[in-house]
Each structure stands twice: as C-alpha cells, then as structure tokens.
Image (cartoon, rainbow, N blue to C red):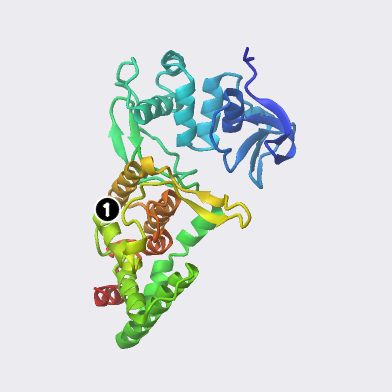
Amino acid sequence: MQNNQISQRIQVFQGRQAPEEGILVGYGALIAYYNLPVPIPQQLALISKKNRKYTEAGWLVFGPRYTPAETPGAQLTFALKYEGINLLFFKKLFEKLSQQQIVDMVQAEYTGQYMRRIWFLYEWLRQEQLPIPDLTVANFVPLLDEKLQYAVPGGIRSGRHRILNNLPGSIAFCPLIHKTGKLENYIAARLNEKINSVFKGVHKDILLRTSAFLLLKDSKASFSIEGENPTQSRAARWGRAIGQAGGKTLSKAELLRLQQIVIENSRFVAMGYRTEGGFVGEHDRSTGDPIPDHVSARWQDVEHLMEGLLETAAYLEKTDFHPVLAAAKIAFGFVFIHPFVDGNGRLHRYLVVSARPSTSFRQDEHFLLLFQKQK
C-alpha cells in the first residue's frame, strides 16, 4: 500500500549526487512516488536544512520555508512555480490518476492559478473535458511562466480556464526550452544587428562570392560527416538547397524533395518516411548486434510525429517566438524522430538555418540579396 509521504530525504537520487542531504520535492518526488515512466528532469528540487537558496549542477536548492505539503496538489504547485511545465510528466501522471482525483484536486482551489494550469493541461493533453463548470471570474494567467521557459508572446485565450495558452507548439509536438543565463546572454547580445553591421561594410560582390564558397564548403563537409565523397555537381546542388533554407514552406513534400537531392542513388535506399525501425550507432563486430547511440522513433509513429512537427513549425512562423529557438526546436525534433532511412543528418543541417527571411536574422538587405541569389 502506498504511503502518504511524497517527498523523501536523500543524498543521492537515481545515481545523481545531491549537493547536500535534503528533501526531494516537486517533480522528482512525484516521479518516484507514482513510479512514472519518464526521464528524470535535468534539474531536481531539494529542500535544505539551512535557510539558503541556490542552484548547482542539476539541483535547485531551497530553504525550509519553501517546503510543500505532503499532498499531490501542493507538490504540483511547487513544481509549476519553481520548475516550470513538464508536459511528458503531466501526460503520464494523468494516466496514473483517476479523473475524480484530478477533479477533487482542482476544485479544492478552483480559482487558483496553478490548479487552473493543471486543469487546462489535463483537458489539453487528453482532449477530454472534466466535469467542472467554466470559470467566469478570474484574471487570465499565462500557462508557461516566461521567467522559467520560453513561450509564444501573447498566447491563445482559453475562456473556460482563464488561461493564456502560450505553449510554443501543438499537442503532437511541443518541446519546451528552459531559460538559462547563457541563452539570455546570447539573445541580449543582438547578434543579428552585429551581423547586419558587418554586412554593410562589405561590397555585395564579395558577399556573393563568399556565400557561394561557404555553401559549397559546408555542403561537402555535410557529406564527409556521413563518410561520402560527393561529385562537385551533387555538392553544389545541396549547397543551393541549403541557401534556400527558410525560403520554402516546410512540408512533407518539401522534405521529400530535399531527401532526393541528398540521396544520389535511391535504388538502394527506401525513400520517404521510414516503414521500419531505425537507430544511430554501430554493430558489434562479433555478433552483429546493434550498439545504438540513439533509437529512432517507432516507424508506426513517424507520420503522426512529423505532422506535429510541421504543424508546430507553421505555427511558430506566425508568432514572435525567437527564430533561433524555433529553428533549434524543429531541427532537434527532426533528428530525434529520424523520419528517413538516410539523409536525416544533412536535412537537420538544413533545418538549423531555416529561420524565415522575415525574421530579425534575415531582414537585412544584404542577407536577403544572398538569399535571393541561391534561388
């Protein structure tokens, strides 16, 4: 029988050494308590005996006054407040708890912002409405806390929950990016303005020649990574494709077109989305058994996952979500899904530079000149 103690005193948790002995709370404690089949979060929350608050190598350490009560609602409130939203965690938690448990939890603090977030997430992730009446009197609150995670500015209003859905994606594909000092420093550096400033001091002919040279060099390097030695014309074709990144709407048809450019001899490769399993890695020389570094998505899920990725790409393009973060999300998702038998790595490079020309990184007339030249 499960006890009522959700948090636990630890020095080590699942092989991760805590910076000091303390009480595991929030997502980590709930994952252990409910035995949820999810990856351990990159940062875990710990309550120290001492009255101090700090961050250290995968740990968020808080003083005793932050200790949440031993109830699922209190632990979830702590997690949302200090650790941000973890969509996979909530999906698996909602599969574990009964609908009535969620209803009772939400109705205990019906108008509270954190319970409203949980209520919204349940109905959004499961596409199933809880027997709770619409909330009519409350201020709208953003789903994602923008102090913790990058969100779509503004968001979509949900009048039922009085929530602004500022998630940067769809139900089928929505990786979240935590704010870090490093990322914030890069954004604050306004690198797009520095790039444009450099461009303005260089003659257009030199920019065009440099662009052509670098595109060809990058194209050859991308084949070299795959152990291939392409012909000059094949490398040039892929270089031109890279130069068009962001100029064409991302779609299944466009990805298939790009794969055909990458794969020179399709007689020996099954083109299009995979209809078999896949992995990235090596084979044991003695047994031939696979030694995977990364296991690709199940082939049965590829179509659905890619539909979600493309839907999210189209949505983010219409928002003011940072273009570099958007390109990173889409490129990461693509290579993680690994939708093709071959060509994934090179198409990933294409997606990395696929921020649209309308974004701040491509609005300068010199950059647009280079972009147009590659068409």
Residue indicated by mark 1? 252
Residue 221 left/right relative to 252? right
Residue 187 vs residue 240, the one in the foreground: 240
- Kindly indicate the quadrant of the structure image that contains residue 192: bottom left
Residue 30 vs residue 309, the one in the foreground: 309
Q: Tell me the amino acid under the disc marked 1.
A: Lys
Q: Residue at x 47, y 72 (%)?
A: 224
Residue 10 left/right relative to 300? right
Residue 128 seen anywhere in this rendered image of the structure: yes
Residue 201 vs residue 368, the one in the foreground: 368
Q: Position of residue 61 (x, y in %)?
A: 66, 38
Would you place residue 248 above or below residue 41 in this image?
Answer: below
Q: Quadrant of the C terminus?
A: bottom left
- Kindly indicate the quadrant of the structure image that contains residue 369: bottom left
Residue 42 vs residue 159, the one in the foreground: 42
Q: Residue at x 47, y 35 (%)?
A: 88
Q: Residue at x 40, y 59 (%)?
A: 342
Residue 173 seen anywhere in this rendered image of the structure: no
Would you place residue 365 above or below residue 354 in this image?
Answer: below
Residue lying furthest front: 286
Circle 1 crowding by C-alpha within 10 Å: few under 14, some 14–19, many from 20: some
Q: In terms of secondary structure, where does tag 1 sit?
A: helix
Would you place residue 307 above or below residue 111 in this image?
Answer: below
